[in-house]
Amino acid sequence: MTASNQSADVIVIGAGIGGLTAAALLQERGVSTLVFEKNRYPGGSCSSFKREGYSFDAGASVFYGFGENDSSGSLNLHTRVFRKLGIDVPTIHDPVQIHYHLPNSFTVLASYDREAFLGTLINRFPHEESGIRGFYRELDDVYDIISSFPAGSLEDVIHLLAVGSGYPLKAISLAQKCFRSMGKTARRYIRDEELLRFIDIEAYSWAVQDAVSTPLVNAGICLADRHYGGINYPLGGAGAIPEGLCRGVEKFGGRIRFHSAVSEILLENGEARGVRLADGSEHYAKAVISNATVWDTFNRLITDLRYHVEKDRFQQAPSWFQLFLGVEGSVIPADFSVHHILVDDWQSYNQPGGTIYFSAPTLLDASLAPPGKHIVHAFVTSEIDMWQHFDRGGQAYREAKERLADEIIAKTERILPGLSKAVELKILATPLTHERYLNRFKGSYGPLLKPGQSILQKPQNRTPVKNLFAVGDSTFPGQGVIAVTYSGVSCASYIARKFGTPLEELV
C-alpha cells in the first residue's frame, strides 16, 4: 500500500458515539478520517428514529456530560467536545435523574439537588445518616479528582506525566480508588440491607451490575456528577448528539459514508491496513478504529484466529427488550418525572425483565411527538437465547413480543394508570433487533468487568493488532454515552500525538 491509494489517514468502523468523537477530534487536528456506517443514520444505540410523527430514542435517554461548570475536566465532555468543534447542541436540564419505585413502597427521586436526594434516604433510614453521608462523600471525592484532570489517553505517557506532575496527590488517590468496588465501599459505611439494595439498583440503573461488581470510579463519575453537571436532554432527542458529531467531522473535511457495512479488517504482517466493505471494495489507511464490540472486531471482522477472543474472556452485558409507544398525552400528568425505574422483587431485579426502565422524554421536548401526544420508552434486560428459536417473520415471534409488552405495560400502570388504553402506536424490539441493526454480538452492550476486577483491567484503545484501535463500550471506561465519549476522546488523543498533531486540551 502506498500513500496514493489511501482513502484517509484513519478509517473508522461504525458511526457510534465513540467512533464519531474520535473522528471529529482527529479531523479538527488535520488528520483525515473516513467513517463507514452500516445504517442510514449515525449514533448506534444513541440515535433517534421517526414513526408516524413521533421521534424515538433508540436507546439511551439519560445524558451526563453537558454541564457548564468549567471545573469538570474529564466529565462534562459533551460540552467540551462540541465547544472544540464549534458545534451547538442545545439541551434542557432535567431536575431528576431517575424516580425509583422499589419494593416495600420505597420511592426515591434522585434529584439534581444533592441535599434533597440525601434527605430522602435519611428520612427512610435515619439510623444510617452518617453512613449515607459518608458513602456519597466517597463518590464526591472521586468526582472532585476526575473533574480536575484534563481528558486524555491512559496509554499516552506524556499525558500521564502531565497529570501526575500537575496533580500528584490526586493522581495517587485515584490510582488507589481504581482498585475499589462501589458495593464494598458502601458496606464500609452502611449496614441496613434495604439501603444496600438501593445502592445496588443505583449501580444497576446504568452499569447493569450490582454495586459489588461496579468500580467505585465509575460510580463516582455518574452518581456524583448528577448533582454537579446534572442530567441534560438534547433538544430533538438522542440523535442530536451523533448528528452534531457528524457536523463536526464534515466541518473540518472528514467524510461519513452511510449504507456502507464493513465486512473485514484487512491485515498485513500483523498490522491493520484498511477495510473491505460488504460490496467488495477495499479502502486503506494508516490506522483503523473499530467501534464494534471486542467479539465482533476480533471474531468477525478479523479472520486471523491468532486474535480470536473467547466469549467467556469477559462477562457479557445483557441486551434489551424495548417498547416504543406513542400515547394519548392526557395519560401522563404534568408533574410526572421523565425517567423511572420499577422493581417489584429484590430477588429478581438483576434477572431478565426484573427491572423496568421507563421514560417520557416529551415532558422535556414536546416536539418529539404530535400535538397532544407523548412518547413512552420502556425497556427491560433480555438475552438473545430467549428469542433465537423464533422465526423473525413468524406469528409466534410477534405473539411472544406482544405478550411480554403487555406484561410490562401492565406493571407500569401502577405509576401510570390507564397506559394500556392510551397506546396509539407500538413498536417492539428484541435482542434480535439489536443484533441485526447494530451489528452487535448477541445484541449485547459489550463486555463487563467481572467481580473483583479493577477498572484498569478494562481494554484500552490500543489492541494486539498494530495500528488497530478500539472505542466504544468494549473499552475503558465502559458502558454509557459519556463513557464511550471518553473512549473516543482518549483514542483521538493517542492517535493525534502518534501522528505528530497533539490534541489540544478540551476547555
Image: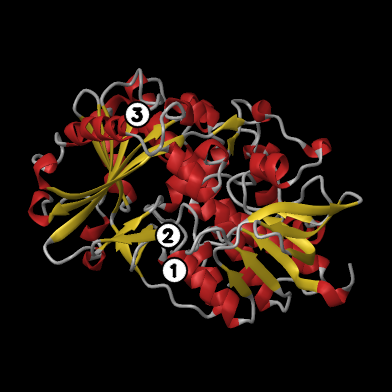
Residue 47 in percent (x, y) is at: 43, 59
Question: Which residue is under mark 2?
Answer: 229
- For label 3, the crowd category at 10 Å Cα-Cα, with few meaning under 14, some 14 to 19 and many 20 or more, is many
Q: Amino acid at mark 3?
A: Gly
Q: Earlier in the sequence, mark 2 or mark 1?
A: 1
Left or right of residue 37: residue 467: right
The quadrant of the picture occupied by the N terminus is: bottom right
Residue 234 in percent (x, y) is at: 37, 65
Work out how far the residue at label 1 is from the one at label 3, CA to CA, in angstroms. Answer: 36 Å
Mark in front: 2 vs 3: 3
Question: Which residue is under mark 3?
Answer: 353
Work out how far the residue at label 2 is from the one at label 1, CA to CA, in angstroms. Answer: 7 Å
Disc 1 and disc 3 in contact, CB within 8 angstroms: no
Q: Amino acid at mark 2?
A: Gly
**Residue for point 83% across, 73% down:** 5
Disc 2 and disc 1 in contact, CB within 8 angstroms: yes
Residue 435 in percent (x, y) is at: 51, 42
Residue at disc 1, secondary structure: loop
**Residue for point 39% across, 36% down:** 202
Residue 271 in percent (x, y) is at: 86, 53
Left or right of residue 171: residue 426: left
The quadrant of the picture occupied by the C terminus is: bottom right
